[in-house]
Amino acid sequence: MNSREVVRRAIEFQTPDRLPVIFPRFGISDTHGAGWNQIGTGPRDRRESLDEWGCLWARSEIDNMGQVKGHPLIDWSNLEHYRWPDPDSPHFYDGMERKFEGSDSKYVTTGIFMLLFERMHALRGFQNVLEDLYLERERVEALADHIVAFDLRIIDNIASRFPGQIQGFSYSDDWGSQKDSFISQHLWHTFFLPRYRRISDACHARGWHVWMHSCGKINRLLPDLIEAGIDVLDLEQPRVLGIEEVGRQFAGRVCFCSGCDIQRTLPFGSENEIRNEAKMLLDYWGTDRGGFLLADDENDQDLGTPLEKKRMALRAFLEFDRWRK
C-alpha cells in the first residue's frame, strides 16, 4: 500500500498494512499539506501582526505563535464599518498549485486554521462569546453563520481548483480546559453541532475526510463531534482525556490522531513510560481494522520536549505497530 492508501484505510477502518505516521520533523510522513494562502497567526518573528480577519496577534520575546490581543468586533457597533475577508479573493489561492509538489502517492490535506469557535472569540473576545451565547443569541448566531459561509466558500474554491487532488480537510478549534469543555453539551449540541455538520457535509460531498484538532478535556463533546461528521480527531493530550476511558467509549467510532501526551509523558516521562503509553494508545484507541494515526505535534517543543523524547516515542509506536504484516 502507498501512503495515501494506508491513511485512507486507517481512517475508514479497512485494515491498513501498517501504522500511518505523520512525523515530518524526522522526514517521515504519509500525509502532505497543501494549504491556501491563509495568514494564520502572521510572521512569528514579529511582536505583532494582523491576520486576514483584522485580529491582532501579539508575541513575547520567546518564539511562539502568539495570542490574539486585538479583537476587531469586541464592540458590536464595530460591525458597521467592519470589512469581512473575501473568500473569493484570488490572492488566497495564487500559487497554491505549487504546494502540491512532492505529494505523489501521499494523502493530501488542506484546511482552515481557527475554523469557527476560535474565530468567533478571536473577533469578539473569549468571555464576550461565552456571554453572547446567552445574552446576544441573534447577533452571535449571525456572526457564526457568516464565518461558516466564509469556510464553505474556501472549501468550494479549493475543491473547484484542485478536483480529485485532496483527500482530507483539517481544522482547529480548541474546546476544552484541563478539566472540561468550555460550554455545556446541550449548548454545543444546539448551537454548534448543526454548523459543524454543514462544513462536514460539504467536505464529504467532495470525497474529503474531516480532521479536527482540539486541545483539552472534551470528553462530553466527543459524541456530538462524531455526530457532526468528524472522521479524524486530533487529540494531543491523551492523559487529560483518559486513554482507557476514551478507548472504551469511542474506539472504532472515529479515527484518532495522536502521539504520547505532549504535556506530561513526552516532556517529563522516562523511556519506559513513553513506551508504555505508546502501546496503550495503540491498544485502546486503535482497533484490529485501524482507527489510529501517529502524529507529531511540531509546536510542542515550546513546552520543552527534547527531540530525543520524540525519537523514543516514534521507535516505540513502530515497535508496537499492531497492523504491520
Image (cartoon, rainbow, N blue to C red):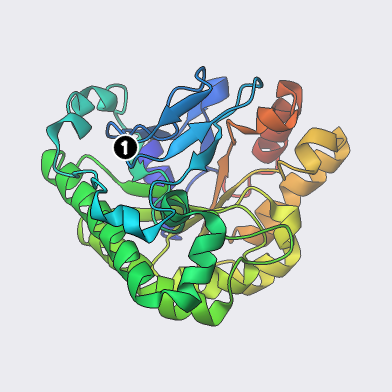
Name above or below for residue 309 compared with residue 225: above
Give the residue displayed 80% in from the left and 43% down from the top.
Answer: 264
Residue at the extreme top? 45
Residue 237 coordinates in the image, percent (x, y): 68, 50
Q: Is residue 207 visible?
A: no
95 relative to 60 in the view: left or right: left
Judging depth in this view, the residue of 138 and 5 nearest the camera is 138
Judging depth in this view, the residue of 66 and 70 nearest the camera is 70
Where does the N terminus fall, quadrant-wise? top left
223 relative to 316 in the view: left or right: left
283 relative to 53 in the view: left or right: right
Name above or below for residue 183 compared with residue 93: below
Q: Is residue 60 visible?
A: yes
Where does the C terminus fall, quadrant-wise? top right
- Label 1: how many residues lie within 10 Å, few (<14), some (14-19) or many (20+)? some
Residue 87 coordinates in the image, percent (x, y): 19, 45
Give the residue displayed 74% in from the left and 65% down from the top.
Answer: 244
Judging depth in this view, the residue of 137 and 198 nearest the camera is 137
Residue 123 coordinates in the image, percent (x, y): 41, 51
Give the residue displayed 24% in from the left and 47% down from the top.
Answer: 84
Give the residue displayed 30% in from the left and 46% down from the top.
Answer: 167
Disc 1 marks which amino acid?
Answer: Glu
Helix or strand or loop: what does disc 1 sit on? loop
Name above or below for residue 220 compared with residue 39: below
Name above or below for residue 254 compared with residue 311: below
Residue at the extreme front? 77
Residue 19 coordinates in the image, percent (x, y): 55, 43
Count of marks, rendered view: 1
Label 1 belongs to which residue? 52
